[in-house]
Image: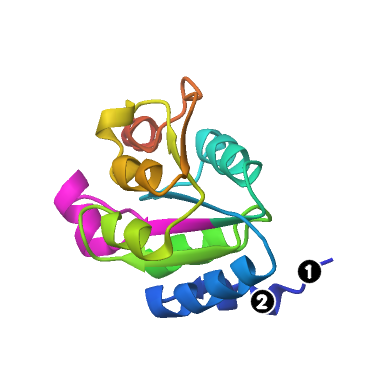
Amino acid sequence: MRKADIIPARIVTLGEAQKIVTQWRVTGKTIAFTNGVFDILHRGHIFSLSQAAAETDYLIVGLNSDASTKRLKGDSRPVNDEQSRALVLASLLMVDLVVIFEEDTPLNLITTLRPDVLVKGGDYTLDQIVGSKEVMEYGGRVIINPIVEGFSTTGIIGKMKG
């Protein structure tokens, strides 16, 4: 069983992630990347993260910062702050690294880390996925996971408001 004290060590900066990815690649390992807000973790998130992790040896999750989330989702979001969201993600078995990013898109993370596989949920088309062109240009793959109907953070928040 894994020790809980390794969980915070999975939350890294982009520079730290670069070093770790280099070490993984030296040993021939492959890397998947996905990203999102992951504000209130639900079944759809677990499915998507599990599918992403199944594609390669390691999974890196790009996490929108609080400021980025507010710009994308509005002033009432995120419900949980970035450190809380990162800690929850880092505690999941299928997640190897979490990198918080301030930009509205993870393009800088993707072009810096150069994942072998870029994974997004089924509510996107290939041309809408940030970084898909870049990943495919260097020989990587882009995978669109099917969406799990009936599970969304917005829906959960709506139910809570009654």
Say whether residue 150 is left or right of residue 59.
left
148 relative to 132, above or below: above
Q: Distance of mark 2 from mark 1, alpha carbons?
A: 8 Å
**Residue sitting at x 62%, y 42%:** 55
Residue 64 within the magenta-colored segment of the rendering:
yes
Q: Which mark is residue 98?
A: none
**What range of the chain is rendered magenta?**
60-80
Q: Quadrant of the N terminus?
A: bottom right
Picture quadrant of residue 153: top left
**Residue sitting at x 36%, y 26%:** 123
x%, y% of residue 133?
30, 41
- Looking at the rendered structure, the secondary structure element under dot 2 is helix
Residue type, mark 1 in image:
Arg
Q: Nearer the viewer, residue 95 or 77?
A: 95
x%, y% of residue 140?
47, 45
What residue would you read off at disc 2? 6
Cβ–Cβ below 8 Å for labels 2 and 1? Answer: yes
Q: Is residue 81 visible?
A: no
Q: Residue furthest top?
A: 149
What residue would you read off at disc 1? 2
Say whether residue 62 is left or right of residue 65.
right
Q: Is residue 70 visible?
A: yes
Picture quadrant of residue 54: top right
Residue 118 within the magenta-colored segment of the rendering:
no
138 relative to 82, above or below: above
**Residue sitting at x 50%, y 23%:** 146
- Looking at the rendered structure, the secondary structure element under dot 1 is loop
x%, y% of residue 29?
66, 60
